Amino acid sequence: MDIKVLVENTSISKDFVSEHGLSLYIEAKGKKILFDLGASDLFLKNAEKLNINISDIDYLIISHAHYDHGGGLEAFLNINVKAKVYLNHLAFERYYALRSDNSLEYVGLDQNLKDNSQIVFTSDQFFIDKGIQVFSNIVQKEAGPKTNKGLLMEKKGKMLEDSFSHEQNLILEEGGKTLLVTGCAHNGIINILDHFHTLRESGPDYVIGGFHLSSSSGGNESSENIEKIAKYLLNTKAKYYTCHCTGIEPYNQLKGIMGDNIEYLSAGSELTI
């Protein structure tokens, strides 16, 4: 499996522009896959620098209904007219963030795109192709990240705490290796891995994605929780590549405990597993 990072909060060099968001290009199972699109059309520019033709993409998976993962959807659909686009069936509900001045900002997807014929709505465990599937409906055994605070959803005209039922994760299997890809892990990376175990009766060999240990408003998960997560991840024996909403400071703490079992990915990074 070959992975190239198109969008991330940081970049490996000035040759690649960064933004608050995530987009990964993956080649696996003879398919060209995009996982998330970042906040804008930036993924197109960085894809060109990495010699990736977006019109050739076979599958697009959007992890959840926030703009920093699906903001580039219109730009994608303008270029690629063949790919199936997989979103959770709740992805076009209305989602908001409560800002520091108590104002509400819409952070969901563009409502004008929900009827596009390329879109396929998923739920629970959904098989895209042989060795390619997504899953949602995460059981909240452990409390979700504290950095979810202020992320809301609109239900019947009322603002409620986001349940993150719209979040889905990707599983890829190739050559005897299993890769789990998360967008933000709003449901909690421990809960997601536990759910993976219920589906597969074993853990993934590799995990790539954000763990939401840091929020754009500037707060980080507590050191105690980060230490707990690090010890859990280390015990799984998987190799982790994290990015985006994990945050640099939380990543450094994870790295201090996990050592070579975790690395950070930036825009322009390339990886083969």
Image (spheres, rainbow, N blue to C red):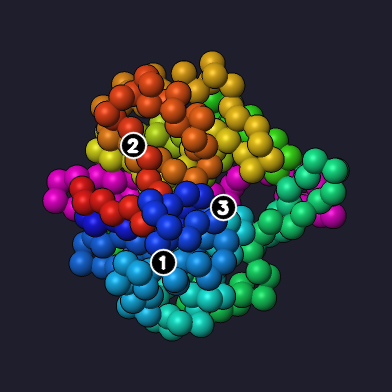
Q: How crowded is the residue under tag 3: few (<14 C-alpha within 10 Å), some, or many (20+)?
A: some
Residue 91: x %, y % from top left: 60, 59
Q: Closer to the N terminus: mark 1 or mark 3?
A: 3
Horizontal side of 72 relative to 107 (left or right) equals left
Q: How far apart are marks 2 and 3 (CA)?
A: 19 Å
Q: Which of 272 and 148 is in front in this view?
A: 272
Q: Distance between the residues labelled 1 and 2?
A: 21 Å
User: Is residue 215 magenta-colored?
Assistant: no
Residue 157: x %, y % from top left: 85, 55
Q: Do the residues labelled 2 and 3 touch (CB within 8 Å)?
A: no
Q: Residue 71 carries which label?
A: none
Residue 223: x %, y % from top left: 54, 19
Residues drawn in magenta: 152-180
* Residue under label 1: 46
Horizontal side of 27 relative to 84 (left or right) equals left
- In the image, residue 132 above or below residue 201: below
Q: Residue at x 65, y 32 (%)?
A: 219
Q: Can residue 139 be seen in this view?
A: no
Quarter occupied by the N terminus: bottom left
- Amino acid type, label 1: Asn
- Secondary structure of residue under mark 3: loop
Secondary structure mostly seen in the magenta stretch: strand
Q: Are marks 1 and 2 in contact (CB under 8 Å)?
A: no
* Residue under label 3: 20
Q: Closer to the N terminus: mark 1 or mark 2?
A: 1
Q: How crowded is the residue under tag 1: few (<14 C-alpha within 10 Å), some, or many (20+)?
A: many
- In the image, residue 158 above or below residue 32: above
User: Is residue 172 magenta-colored?
Assistant: yes
Q: Closer to the N terminus: mark 2 or mark 3?
A: 3
Q: Residue at x 43, y 52 (%)?
A: 11
- Secondary structure of residue under mark 2: strand
Residue 271: x %, y % from top left: 26, 51
